[in-house]
Image: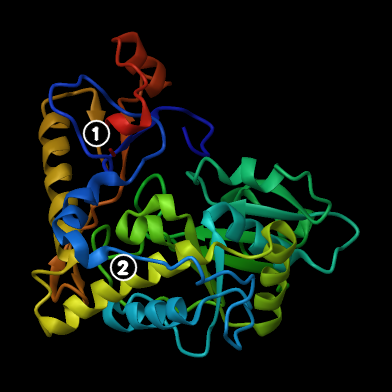
Amino acid sequence: MCGTERSSHSIVSLSNGSRANLPVIDLDPGNPTVFEEYWRRMGDKCRVEIPGCDLMSYKAPTGNVCWFLLPELVEAIRGLYRVVGNAVVDERHLVVGTGSRQVFQAALYALSTPASLKPIHVVSAAPYYSSYPEETDYLCSRLYKWGGDAKQYDTNKSGAFIEVVNSPNNPDGCMRLPVVEDSFGQGKLIHDLAYYWPQFTPITSPADHHLMYFTFSKCTGHAGSRIRWALVKDREVAVKMTTYIELNSLGVSKDSQFRTAKIIELLCNDYQKFGLDVSNSFFEYGNRVMAERWKNLRDVIGRSDVFSLPTFERQYCCFLGRPSRPYPAFAWLKCKEEIEDCGSFLRGYKYRRAKREAFWS
């Protein structure tokens, strides 16, 4: 259950690699090894060798605000957005972090400093990503604290806020816009665009926000590299985010950055190799895989009068060059009204909570 008062919904991960004949519905967060087959086929194209004398310094040879960001990764990320067209990258500062949680904390720190008399509220519209409350309050910061459902937030009573806009949204897959009525200009926005890639949703236009972040794990499936980055319009915000990461971990692994850059370069080079034909691209492959998983799930759920799934309209995807439906990484499974707790209902029929690697692995 993620960010709702009632628990008549459950999340089923569609991004794990399934294993045959396992009576498993995974209600845990996904482990995105679903694209492993594609990268296995790439073979030595993705092999990275790093001599022992390379990448030894804390610093990167670059003039970026983020002083530990490798120039190879900067060029790779900028090239990726120019190919996919899912975000405006020009006139943006890049900040890299060790996974989504560090970048999220860095963004909260940057937007809440200098400190006010009381912590600023962090909100997101329900249903929201289940880790937002825990991640926000984990450090018991005097700068910010979790404020709940953005749809219920009253700026007249509670004042300044940071709204996290997750689009496409985890867990229900819907595209999101800010919802807090901010008549007095007290709000700041974080756009979490982890799933705004062509395998999960149609790319209808480049995202153009002041602070938006993406993650390597959802882009290509390489969760183990622990690389996330933010595109930041305001230089001062980018400097503060970099300061947080510097104080927290004194930078980000150069080895992971280098591997990330090489894999992203491969994606871009393949696209350029085939011109405008994206049929052989990683993202077209990923879109086909997710479409097949959603078809199989809908076939199963369609036989039941107990469960239902959200429906999504086709939209033209600028990257794929054709209409496509959203295929979210998680399925927002709804029970009929008289069942108040979908998770408990499933457990009552002996559907067990699976290990994470059993169903997105």
Q: Assess whether mark 1 and mark 2 are in contact (beta carbons under 8 angstroms).
A: no
Residue holding disc 1: 308
Q: Quadrant of residue 294?
A: top left
Q: Nearer the viewer, residue 178 or 209?
A: 209
Please give the name of the residue rendered at 13% of the width and 30% of the height, measured from the top-left corner: 300
Determine crowd level at label 1: few under 14, some 14-19, many 20+ residues with C-alpha closer than 10 A.
some
Q: Quadrant of residue 310?
A: top left
Is tag 2's residue or tag 1's residue first in the polypeptide sequence?
Answer: 2
**236 relative to 139, above or below:** below
**214 relative to 150, above or below:** below
Q: Nearer the viewer, residue 153 or 197?
A: 197
Q: Which percent across, then down, holds residue 247? A: 75, 62
Residue 168 seen: no
Which tag is nearer the camera, tag 2 or tag 1? 2
Q: Quadrant of the C terminus?
A: top left
Q: The residue under label 2 is which amino acid type?
A: Ile
Q: Give SS at disc 1.
A: strand
**With 173 as the anchor, is 211 left or right in this view?**
right
**With 259 as the anchor, is 289 left or right in this view?**
left
Please give the name of the residue rendered at 43% of the width and 69% of the height, measured from the top-left corner: 258
Q: Quadrant of residue 204?
A: bottom left
Q: Which percent across, then down, holds residue 271? A: 18, 78
Residue holding disc 2: 263
Question: Mark on residue 339?
Answer: none
